[in-house]
Amino acid sequence: MDFELRSVFCCLPKMERGVVKVLGGDPKGNNFLYTNERSVIIRNVQNPAIADIYSQHAHPAIVAKYSPSGFYIASGDSSGKVRIWDTTQKDHILKYNYQVFSGRIKDIAWTEDSKRLAVVGEGRSSFGSVFLWDSGSSVGQINGHSKVINSVDFKQNRPYRMATAGDDFTSVLFEGPPFKFCLSHTDHNKFVNCVRFSPDGSLYATAGVDGKIFLYEGTSGSKVGSLADDKAHSGGVNAICWNSDGTHMLSVSADKTAKVWDIATRKAVTTFTMGQDLLDHQMGCLWQGQDLITVSLSGYINFLDQNNPSKPRLIVKGHSKSIQCLTVHKTKDMNKIFTGSHEGGINQWDAKTGVCESFDGKGHTNLVSSIGVEDSVGDLVSCSMDDTVRFTNINSKRHSAGDVVKLNSQPRCSALGSGGHVIVLLVDKIVLLKDRKYGIGIEETEYEPQAVSVHPGGVTVAIGGSDANVHLYSIEGNSLRDNQQVLPVKGPVTDLQFSPNGNFLLVGDANKVLTVFSVADGYKVENNYYGHHAKVVAVAWAPNSQYFASSGMDTIVTVWTLGNNENRLKMQDCHPLHHITALTWIDDNTLVTTSGDACVKQWDIIHGSPGIICGSVVRYTERYDA
C-alpha cells in the first residue's frame, strides 16, 4: 500500500477581537498568506481551494511576508522568533532562524532587494529590529516609540525610508541604511494600527483607531493631508493597502465596512458594507492584482467586487479552531464532508471542489463532540458540550430552536441507529432518543461510557468503557436493554466501530492496541493489531470492510488489512504537530482526516504492494505556482 495527498481544505485565519490580522501577498500576484496557531497558510488567489501549509513554528505564528524576490517567506511568532524559509521547494527548507526579541511579533517588512528585514512588535527590551536577512547583523535602530509598535514598512526604492506606527499614537520615519530616526508624527489621537508606503514610494499612509487615515510625503515625511474631510471610517481603521499603481487605497474598519479611496481626490469611490454583526468587523486587507481581499472577525475571507459593492463575489469559509469530528454523506451529485469544531461551528464541504458552506442560525455554543447524517430524513445529528443534541436539515443548513433536545449533562459522543434512534453517552448514563424524544435508556452505569457504535442491522449497540471492556446492548422499540455480554480489551476504550457489512467490531484503546471481534462467531477475537506508539484516538472502516484506519496521539495514521497484521500503511506527518482527531472513508481508496490544525485533508490510498510501508507526506497532486 501507498498513499498520496489529494487535497487540503485549509483553516481560516485565527482572529481576535481588536487585533489586526496582517495578510501577506506574493509579488507575482498568485498567492496570499495568513497564519493560524503554528501554521502559515499559502492560498491561491484565483482558486483558494489550492493551498499549502507550513507548520514548523514552535509557537503560534502571527505574521508572514513574502520577500520581493518571491523566493522566501519570513514568518514571525509570539515568542519573537523569525523563520525565513524557501517557497520554491515543496519541503519549504528553513534558510535562517533568528530570535529578534522576546515577545509577540506584529509585523514584518522587506526592502526591495530582499536583503534587509524589519521586525516590530511587543518586545520586552525593544519594540523592533532591522537587520540583514542572511546574517542577522543590525543595519540600524528602531526607536522613537514608547509603546508597542504595531506596523512597519519600507519605501521600495532609493533613497530608502522606513516607517513605523505604534500604540503611543505616533508614527516614525527612519532614513538609511543604516536606519536612524528622522522624524515623528502625532496626528492620531489613538493607537496607530497600520503604516504602508505607496508602490512608487512617493507617499506613505497611516491608519488608526481614531478612524483617520493620514498621508505623508514618502522621502521627507512632511504631512500631505488626510483621506476624507474628518474621519475615513466611523470606527477604527484596522488595515490599509495600496493598489499596484498607487492611485487607490483599500481600507477596512471595525465599522464593518471596507472602502476604496481615490488618492488624487482623497474621496471614497466605493464602500462595501460587510454586515451588521459583531463578527463582520473587518480586521485585515490585501490588494493583490485585481483582487481585493478582506478578513472578517469571523475569519471569513472576502473577495470584493467593485461592480457590486453590496455583496462579495466570493466568501471563503472554514474552521479557525480545532476540528473535533466529521462524517461523510454520499449523494448522486456529490460527496459531502461535514465537520464540527471546538467552538461549536459545523461546516459542509464539497469533497471534489473544497467549497465550504456554513450552517446558518444559532447553533452549538461549545465543542461539537460527534456528528452523523440520518439518511432517511436528511438530518445532521450533532451532540455538543453545550448539553444539547441538534437535528439540522442538511439541505436548508439552518439551525432551528425547535430542533434541539436538551440533555441533563455534557455528552461524550453519540451514534445513529435505524428508525430514528440516537444513542447518546453521558458521564455515567446512556440516553436513547427515538424520533427526537426520550426513550428508556440506562440510568446509571458501573463504568464511564467512552465510545458507541450501532450495528448496521440497527439492533445491537456496542459501548466502550473506561473499564477496558465493550458492553453490548439491544434496541427494543424505544428502550435500550443490557445484553449482559462484556468483551474485554487491552485498555480503556477510546473509539469503536462496527464494519459496514456488520461482520466485525473494531475497538481502539488507550494501551495502543486495536482489537477486532468477529460478530458472526459470537464476538470471538479475530486478531489484535499493534503498531501505534501512543493511545488510539479514532478508528474507521473502509466501505468494503476489508481495510480499516486508525489514528493515535503519536500523530500517525495507520491503514490496516483485515486478517493481515503485517500488511499495513503508516502515514506520518499527515497533520504536522497535531494528532488526528477524526477520520473516515469516502470510498475504499479515499481517506479523510481532521486535526487540531483546523484543516481537512483527503488522501488517496493505493492498495497493492504487501508489507509495511512507513512514509511522510511528500507528494501533492495539485501545486500552486510559487
Image: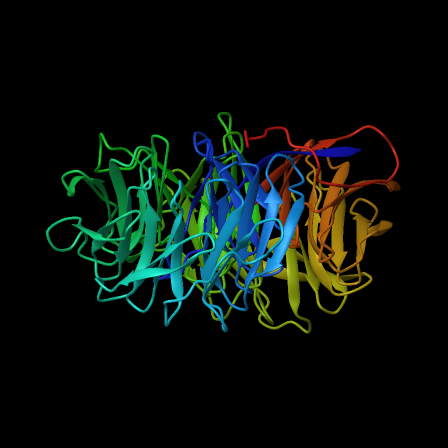
In front here: 224 or 408? 224
Q: Which residue is drawn at 80% across and 50% down?
A: 517
Classify the position of the N terminus by image quarter. top right
Q: Which residue is drawn at 51% across and 68% down?
A: 103
In front here: 381 or 200? 200
Residue 116 appears in the picture as rendered: yes
**Left or right: 393 in relation to 514:** left
Q: Which residue lies furthest to the left in this view?
A: 229
**Is 303 drawn above or below residue 153 in the view shown?**
above
In front here: 579 or 445? 579
* Residue 424 placement (x, y as % from top left): 55, 60
Q: Quadrant of residue 378?
A: top left
**Is 213 drawn above or below residue 141 in the view shown?**
above
Classify the position of the C terminus by image quarter. top right
Residue 369 appears in the picture as rendered: no
**Is 385 drawn above or below residue 226 in the view shown?**
below
In front here: 290 or 123? 123
**Left or right: 561 in relation to 307:** right
Looking at the rendered structure, the number of numbered marks drawn on it comes to: 0
* Residue 215 placement (x, y as % from top left): 23, 50
* Residue 278 placement (x, y as % from top left): 28, 57
* Residue 389 placement (x, y as % from top left): 46, 58
**Is 498 drawn above or below residue 50 in the view shown?**
below
Q: Which colour scheme is used?
A: rainbow
